[in-house]
Amino acid sequence: MTAKRRKIKRFMAQNYALKYLTQAALSAPKDLLNSYIARFTPIHPTVLIYHCTFVCDARCEMCSNWQRGDRKTDMSLDQIRTAFQSPLWKNVEMAMLSGGEPTTRNDMVEVSQVIIDSLPKIRKYGINTTGLTPHRAIPMITKVAEYCAEKGVIFSVRVSIDGVGEMHNEVRQVKGGFEKANKTIDAMRELQKRVPFNFGVSATIFNRNIDDCENILAWARKEKLDIVFNMVRFSDPMLGNGDLANTVKPIGRDEQRLREFFLERVRMDPVLDGQNYIHMHYADMIGNGYHREAPCPFQSQGIMLNPDGGLFFCENSEVMGNVVTDDPEEVYFRATSQKHREWVKETQCPTCLSPCQMNVAAVKQVVPYVKFLYRAGREKRKRVAPRPAEPAAVGSK
Ligand SMILES: C[S@@+](CC[C@H](N)C(=O)[O-])C[C@H]1O[C@@H](n2cnc3c(N)ncnc32)[C@H](O)[C@@H]1O
Ligand code: SF4
Ligand code: SF4
């Protein structure tokens, strides 16, 4: 790449990040007001996660969505269009398409367009993908990126990478999976030269790949890829994996190593990096015996929609109703649903590991964010402080 092209690419990326931060800053007063109002009365959701299918092109060891994927029960494009006509979605600003593997849907581009067109306040749209079927993922994501650029919506894509080379293939149980995902990654970076969007990878760490953390990090750095690390968690509504809690979670020394790895990320990475807040959250949770301190937008303004139309407050709520058979707004605001949200807050939130949209929501919640900046700063100082000299071992020279 020539120096001039590198400069243009850097400028486009910075400009895009600036646009994102400016939008976040401009909406801050309204966000604060929303959070305040939500303390007293239910408000329309502003954050949405939509699992458009559980059909998948991988068979991951830490997620069981692939076992329950069933195209017949996925909402059709027409059903999605009808459901999104509801005023329930009128304030959604951030929408994330996930699954299962979204690109297994032939109509993923149209689904994305329906969502973007139906949300009058949408600012950010994101897709999580395995990237394991490049011949489908690349053209589909290209079209969505172009559509978002046309509509002035900030677009983000993350490809999942859970190990380098064979480790990724083993976790995902896909032959040649690492090469396939890399084909999608390369295409995304090529696309970024033409269409602006945020791109990165994400790694989910559990007992199988914990020894590969540093490898994954070194690989991402070498490839100059933005990376977020997730700690494995368990949720039947989102991942279908409640039964894996006793088998794939790192425990004992492994769990402490993972804590140290997350703390090291906080020490080493720029404090304003969006992932920093998430990594600090995981380190805190392991360190304090899983007591959540971080805020979560889903407590008062999030919503999760599953492939069959099942509507949830979040990954740890029960289903409230179904948007195919019922009026989505009525389902959300009905008294039994709102009572259920109180149950979620009282019983699930205190120990919940979920980082869902937390980095985005964090900057809108001044007090927790200032606390985070303070503590991240303290961790950073630990990095530069010289270690005290080890006392010489008995008998050593
Ligand atoms: C459920 S997947 C759906 C999108 C797509 N199939 C993929 O794998 O990227 C969304 C994200 O959840 C992560 N994930 C999978 N299992 C998880 C678990 N048990 N705990 C935390 N995150 C998990 C994946 O690695 C991926 O980054
Ligand atoms: S993590 Fe993604 S690719 Fe793996 S089984 Fe779950 S939904 Fe499928
Ligand atoms: S249970 Fe977790 S995801 Fe749900 S609202 Fe509480 S903190 Fe957020």
Image (cartoon, rainbow, N blue to C red):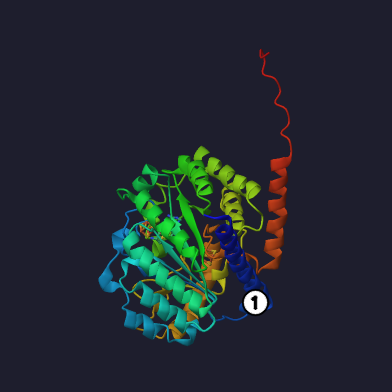
Give the amino acid at mark 1. Ser
**Dividing the image into 4 quarters, which one contains the C terminus?**
top right
Let me know if residue 232 appears in the view. no
Number of labels in the image equals 1
Q: Say few, some or many: other residues with alpha carbon within 10 Å of mark 1 (under 14 / 14 to 19 / 20 or more).
A: few
Q: Residue at x 38, y 81 (%)?
A: 323
Q: Is residue 354 visible?
A: yes
Please identify the quarter of the rendering in which residue 2 is found: bottom right
Q: Position of residue 190 (x, y in %)?
A: 45, 60
Quarter of the view holding residue 281: bottom right
Instruction: Mark 1 and ligand 3: say if the CB distance to the nearest ligand atom is below 8 Å.
Output: no
Query: Circle 1 sits on which residue?
Result: 27
Q: Nearer the viewer, residue 103 or 2?
A: 2
Compared across the picture, whether 342 is left or right of 61 comes to right
Q: Is residue 72 above or below residue 138?
A: below
Lateral position of residue 89 relative to residue 11, left or right: left
| Percent x, y of residue 206 | 45, 47
Residue 330 x %, y %: 45, 85
* Residue positioned most to the left: 72
Picture quadrant of ligand 2: bottom left
- Judge from the rendering whether residue 121 lies leftward or rightward of residue 82; answer left or right: right
The structure residue drawn at horizontal position 34% and vertical position 45%, both measured from the top left corner, is 170
What SS does tag 1 mark?
A: helix
153 relative to 380, above or below: below
Q: Which residue is drawn at 68% across and 62% down?
A: 369
Q: Position of residue 115 (x, y in %)?
A: 43, 79
